[in-house]
Amino acid sequence: MRIGDRYLLRETLLYFGVGLLVFTFVIFMREAGQLLDLLARGSSWSLLLALLYALPATLIFTLPMAALVGILIALGRMAGDQELVAMRAIGRSGWQLARPLLAFSVAVTAVALSFTLWLAPAGARALLRLEARLRNSQLVLAAQPRVFLETIPHAVVYIGDIAPGGGSWRQVFVADMRDPNSPQITMARRGMLAATGPNEVQLHLQDGTSYSVSRRRPDVALASSFVSSDLPLRLPPAKVNTQTLPALATPALFARARQGRREAQIELDRRLALAFACMALALLGIPLGLRMRAGGKAAGLVTTLLLVLGYYIVLITGLALAHQGTVAPAVGVWAANAVCAAVGVGLLLGMDRLPNSAGAARDPAARLRAAVSRPAAWLRSFRRAGGEAAAARTAMGRGQRWMPTLLDGYVIREFLGYVALLTAGLLVMILAFTFFELLGAMLRTHAGLGIMARYLFYLSPQMMYLLAPVVILVGVLITFGLMSNGNEITAMKACGISVYRLLAPIVAVALALAVLQFGVGQSWLPRFNREQDALRARIKGQPARTYQQPERHWVMGKHNDIFYFQYFDPATNQFSNLSIYNFDPRTFQLTRRIHARLAYWDRDLHAWVFESGWLRDFSGPQVTRYQPFAIASFSRVRERPAYFKADARVSTQMNYQELSRYVRDLRRGGYNVSRLTVQLDKKIAYPVITLIMALLAFPFALSAGRRGTVAGIVAAIAVAIVYWVGSGFLAALGGLGQIPPAAAAWAPDLLFLIAGVYLLLRVPT
């Protein structure tokens, strides 16, 4: 192999590795919080296994993009440094330059084929078996304070609080639902769930009381207190379905496809198409990279994002049409690869053609390119001249130094353009990965493409919210990296402009984006998160964590009441078969139970009216009063109908004010609110990190531009990864009560702000 070929391959492999790291990290960002929470609870070995099993399926998506970004950034950097011109000058043709890159793309395609045909299905099967083995421990981890746990058959469990570390529960309410008309109630001050077998768990309760009422004889009630009691809870046998299409071995999938099963044909074509996407995108990227004349690494990254954006849009559209039966499976799945390969081969064939001026004059395409390039060149020179003139005017007077200029507009336009492009490219990548991740569940539950499309739509705002610091970081790197490579920053310094002045418009835009990020989190994001959580649960065939009425039968009231009903009509504000359990929050013992066949809201009385029921008061395990009634009203029941029409929400489904009120109410009740307090503080701390990332990226951008290497970019990406890992782990520790919640939420922001200011002060102005 020639020295030039080895040099080109080294450059490509370097950027390929960086791209693979970045894209894989971005895909795992969404699950980072949950994974780090498991790590903080001590599930490190299971977490490591789950990551290893899920990694092949992730690499199937990131390998084509990483190969493309490696080729384009390497060629873009060499074009910016005139190395491609030098190679052409010594007689290296375009085909000779493309040959090692084609060999590289073939090697990546072979690796991708090994993942998609063997490792990814094997990893999916192993992950399903691991989830089945860890089902009991997952049940413990799924338990959340102040949320009814309804995943145990014939039982409903409510936990008032979870001790730091997650091992012990406080204020445990258990309803035996084998007779839904008259559930048996057990209330204990403490409890713990432990696995006793593959399909069995045991709820160990301490200091509690059991209550039961006969449905036929409501006047007869049994209550017994206990110091310690064990409730065995049997789970249905774990069904490890390794025959789902994503987990099916390739030979078995091929056999199903030969039988004419459409879904199997689509899955088989999808596996092959994603692997050969490395080759298709490389065929398109190599001639585009060899045609670059300026822009360096940033131009390669921008081109990569554009190509990835177009590729996945065509791929998802083709898959949707194939599933609907509009087009043949092969046509829908392979359309994106065919388009990329056809355009790439056409560009490769014309790579070494050098048209003369006469030919260019007669060529309509050449005339069109020339007509477009002249205004573009004039506009670039006008912007540059305007920026230099504005810089000169600004340098004349110190009082006008910080006033907005044309230069600020130029920097802001460039910066926002890259931010928008990065957001679109990374968002499409994440949505495409999510689509393929849930495709098997969608086919199994027959959810349909309409529900999947709605889910991806409602998921997009949350992903953009999470991606904001990443795109700000990379956007600053690209903007000032290009300006540094083009010596624009040197020219501005020569005009007397400080680099801090160049950063001012970026800080202003980053501040505006952080405010917008917080505003979206206050307004649209909670509602969108409620919708996407419910749709995801529907696609996966699981009960939704947030229930819309009338399906939610258990509701915790505001004043130490637990409501259970068989039906609630939100139009008429009427309950059917309603029971209200009132308890003493200090001893967590039942003090009163009200049962009524019918209950409705009286607008004149502004109270609930109960019909055909009974009232029973308790003092410990003793029944002190039993009173049947035909019609009654109780002033202690003060929840209005709107309270029962609201959803049960988690922190991501509430804005700052709603979560603050929720935390305040729980704190007054004596509950541990460490986890929710961390999430409350992060609703402000996370938008702030968007601004801090802009400050932190600026010195890295200038450093990368000066050295002409990937050192600055790699360091900045490493900083981003450190932030997400550190922030997620600290949040998990804060939720477990091991560090103060405020420190868990704000420590990463403070540390990175100090690092950013320190690096800014070391930048030559």
Image: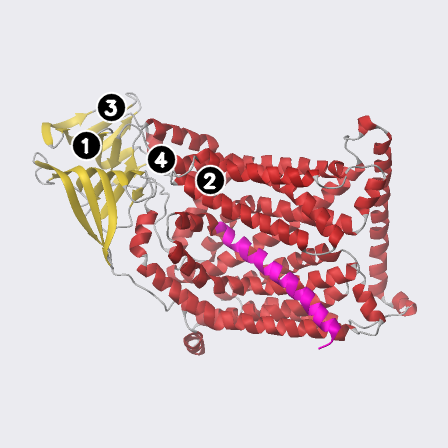
Q: Is residue 396 left or right of residue 149?
A: right
| Residue at the image point whose x is 39% and y is 62% from the top | 127
Q: Position of residue 301 (x, y in %)?
A: 68, 56
Circle 1 residue: 589
Nearest the camera: 102 or 485?
485
Label 1 SS: strand
| Sooner in the amino-acid sequence: mark 1 or mark 3 | 1
756 is higher (above) or lower (below) than 639 = below
The tag earlier along the polypeptide, 1 or 4, is 1
Is tag 2's residue or tag 3's residue first in the polypeptide sequence?
2
For label 4, the residue is 645
Residue identified by numbered label 3: 636
CA separation in Å, label 1 and label 3 = 17 Å
Is residue 725 highlighted in magenta? no
Q: The residue under label 1 is which amino acid type?
A: Gln
Give the CA separation, mark 4 to mark 2.
Answer: 15 Å
